[in-house]
Every structure is written in structure tokens, then in C-alpha cells.
Image: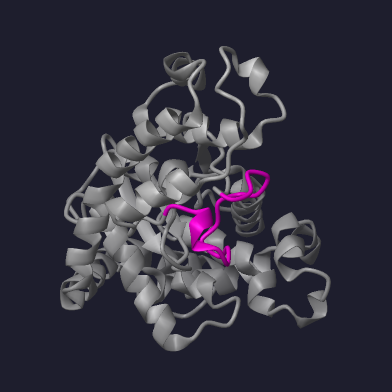
């Protein structure tokens, strides 16, 4: 990669299945927009994925699927870097150093581990427990200073800064820079189409609960027609949507996909029934998502291209991370390899 004075962004996404509309509106669309004016390093975090057991064949397939969707959404692998985490050993090398810098008490306070481990924490993998240290290494291996982050990862980002600060203090250096969170403009929280009290999730047993980024136009339209609603028409004010979660969810999706505010979207349909509204919502979703689905499928038909793109990105990523992590190892006191 040519020398670039633009701020460096790092962000990662797990290859855990077909991304949904919620992933697109909450993160992936923002990743595409951030390519303007930034040096972006985007990583498919397959090492994070195996903190819970994965079928090896499925993991490889899911990694390619995620790469195809990212490329289809508009990630440019020439202008920026797209790669899979396991292809750059610097991540694991720095993660071990950070395992030795981070304190057990810090990890014990991580709420996401408690949520993911559930009641039987003794059966959780140690990888899941130290997951935040690897996340810190992912970012600091590139001296990235900006990280797009959602609310569920804020605590991990704070930990990444704590680890960097302790490393710098312990070794008397100013080596790892402070990370700043990039908070995207407020968007609707995208909920299940079948139960608007639950987040839209690619792990939901019901495929009708979500819009997948590989859904074709007919599937999108059918899912929106079947989406749960209430019998009342859309009101004139947002305040009147209180205690109507399905209406709030669909209105929020329409506002987000069309670039309107919820109030503007509501003004367009005030007094209308859900039949007409759902038709317009489906049209808007199809217009934006169908090209992504079609391009992703074309890419998946050529897995050799996907692999070559990720491998090229990994070489460029390693060229940045390798020297940084080698210097961290020198600071710690390791002999040169």
C-alpha cells in the first residue's frame, strides 16, 4: 500500500453466517462510506469465530460468503485492505503479549463474556474469555486510531486503550496510540420481522424474521408482506407509536433505507394502512439490496477470485502489522526471529 497520511481505520466482522439487513444498516453501509478520506483495514475475524466451535468446512464457506458480501456492498480491495485474520500471524503474536499485559480483573468485568458464556461459564472456552485481548491486538497491530464501534463493543474498545496504556507505562514507551471510537450517525435498531422485541439476527431459527443480504427481490417482498404488524393505521406523530414495536421497527427500516428521519417517513404515510406502506418499503429494500445480492452471488461463483483477493489483502496487511508487532516484541525483550 502506498504511503497514506489519512487516518487509519480498523474494523472486523465475524464470519458467522449471511449478514442481515441489520448488519448492513448498522455497520456495513458505514464501512463503505468511511472509505472516503480514510485508510481502511477491514478484517474477517475467523480467529474470533472459533471461540465457539465451528465446523471447518462451514467456517471456510462462511468466510468466503462474508468476503463476497463485503465486496458486493462496495468495499474496494484496491483502495483499502480486506483480508481474513488468520492469514496475518501478527494478530496472534501481539494477542499473546496483550494476554500478559491485561489483568484478570479487567476481563472479569467484560459483560459480553457473561452474556455469551451463559450460566455454565466453566464450560466456555478460554478463547472466549480472552477474546477482548485479541480484539485489542487486531487494532493495535496496525496502530489504527479510529474504530467504528457499536454499543456492544464499547467496553472492549475501552479495554484496548487500557491495555495499550499499561504496555506503554510498563515498558516506558509511547508506542501504542490511543484509539477513538467512530460512532455512526444514529440509525434505527433493526428488530425481528416476526417479533419486534428481539433484535434481527442471522441465528434466529426463522428465516422469515430477517432480511438476508443474499435474498432475491421476491424473497424480500414476501418477507415484508408477512412481517408482523398491528391492525391500526400509521399515526401522524411518533409519540403515537408508543407501545407499537412492529410499527416502529418497520418505519425505522424505511427511514434508514431511504435516508429519511423517522418523522419524515411517518409524515409520508400518516393515516395509511400497512398494506400500502409495506409495498413501498419492499420496493425501497429491493432497489438497494438486490444489486448487492446479485453481485455477491456472482462473486461466490468464483471462489478463486475471493481467495486471491483475501490473500492479496493479507499480504498488504502483514506488511503493516509485521514491523509494528516485531517492534513490540523487541520492546518486551524477545530476540529477533
In this rendering, position of residue 195 left or right of residue 5? right
Q: Most extreme residue toward the bottom, as rendered? A: 56
Residue closest to the eye, 88 or 58: 58
Residue occupying the point 48% across, 20% down: 272
Residue at image location 21% in from the left, 49% down from the top: 291
Task: Identify the residue shown where x is 43% and y is 52%.
Answer: 211
Q: Position of residue 278 (x, y in %)?
A: 43, 35
Q: Is residue 120 magenta?
A: no
82 w.r.t. 144: above or below: below
Q: Position of residue 103 (x, y in %)?
A: 75, 63
Confirm whether residue 145 shows in the render: no
Horizontal arrangement in the rendering, residue 212 relative to residue 173 (left or right): left
Q: Using the image as rendered, state which of residue 151 and residue 154 is in the foreground.
A: 151
Q: Main secondary structure of the magenta part?
A: loop
Q: Is residue 43 above or below residue 247?
A: below
Tell me the quadrant of the picture where the C terminus can be found: bottom left
In this rendering, would 13 be left or right of 190?
left
For the N terminus, the image quarter is: bottom left
The tally of labels here is 0
Q: Is residue 236 above or below residue 109?
A: above
Question: Residue at the location (75% across, 56% down)?
Answer: 111
Residue 202 within the magenta-colored segment of the rendering: yes
The residue range painted magenta reads 194-211
The residue closer to the viewer here, 13 or 57, is 57
Residue 60 visible (yes or no): yes
Amino acid at each position: 500500500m502506498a504511503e497514506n497520511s489519512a487516518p487509519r481505520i480498523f474494523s472486523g466482522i465475524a464470519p458467522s453466517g449471511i449478514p442481515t439487513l441489520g448488519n448492513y444498516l448498522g455497520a456495513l453501509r458505514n464501512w463503505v462510506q468511511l472509505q472516503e478520506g480514510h485508510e481502511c483495514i477491514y478484517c474477517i475475524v475467523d480467529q474470533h469465530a472459533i471461540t465457539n466451535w465451528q465446523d471447518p468446512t462451514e467456517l471456510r464457506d462462511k468466510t468466503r460468503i462474508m468476503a463476497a458480501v463485503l465486496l458486493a456492498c462496495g468495499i474496494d480491495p484496491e483502495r483499502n485492505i480486506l483480508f481474513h485474520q488468520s492469514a496475518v500471524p501478527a494478530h496472534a503474536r501481539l494477542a499473546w503479549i496483550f494476554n500478559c499485559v491485561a489483568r484478570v480483573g479487567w476481563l472479569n468485568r467484560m459483560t459480553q463474556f457473561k452474556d455469551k458464556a451463559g450460566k455454565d461459564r466453566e464450560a466456555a472456552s478460554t478463547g472466549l474469555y480472552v477474546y477482548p485481548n485479541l480484539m485489542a491486538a487486531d487494532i493495535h497491530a496496525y496502530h489504527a486510531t479510529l474504530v467504528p464501534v457499536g454499543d456492544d463493543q464499547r467496553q472492549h474498545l475501552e479495554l484496548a486503550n487500557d491495555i495499550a496504556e499499561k504496555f506503554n507505562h510498563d515498558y516506558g514507551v509511547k508506542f501504542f496510540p490511543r484509539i477513538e471510537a467512530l460512532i455512526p450517525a444514529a440509525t434505527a435498531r433493526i428488530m425481528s420481522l416476526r417479533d419486534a422485541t428481539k433484535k434481527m439476527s442471522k441465528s434466529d431459527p426463522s428465516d422469515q424474521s430477517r432480511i438476508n443480504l443474499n435474498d432475491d427481490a421476491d424473497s424480500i417482498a414476501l418477507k415484508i408482506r408477512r412481517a408482523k404488524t398491528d391492525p391500526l393505521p400509521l399515526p401522524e406523530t411518533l409519540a403515537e407509536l408508543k407501545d407499537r414495536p412492529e410499527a416502529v421497527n418497520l418505519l425505522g427500516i424505511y427511514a434508514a433505507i431511504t435516508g429519511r428521519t423517522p418523522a419524515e417517513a411517518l409524515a409520508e404515510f400518516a393515516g395509511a394502512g400497512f398494506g400500502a406502506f409495506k409495498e413501498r418499503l419492499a420496493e425501497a429494500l429491493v432497489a438497494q439490496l438486490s444489486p448487492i445480492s446479485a453481485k455477491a452471488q456472482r462473486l461466490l461463483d468464483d471462489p478463486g477470485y475471493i481467495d486471491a483477493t483475501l490473500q492479496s489483502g493479507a499480504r498488504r496487511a502483514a506488511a503493516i502489522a509485521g514491523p509494528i508487532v516485531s517492534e513490540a516484541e523487541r520492546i518486551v525483550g524477545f530476540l529477533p526471529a
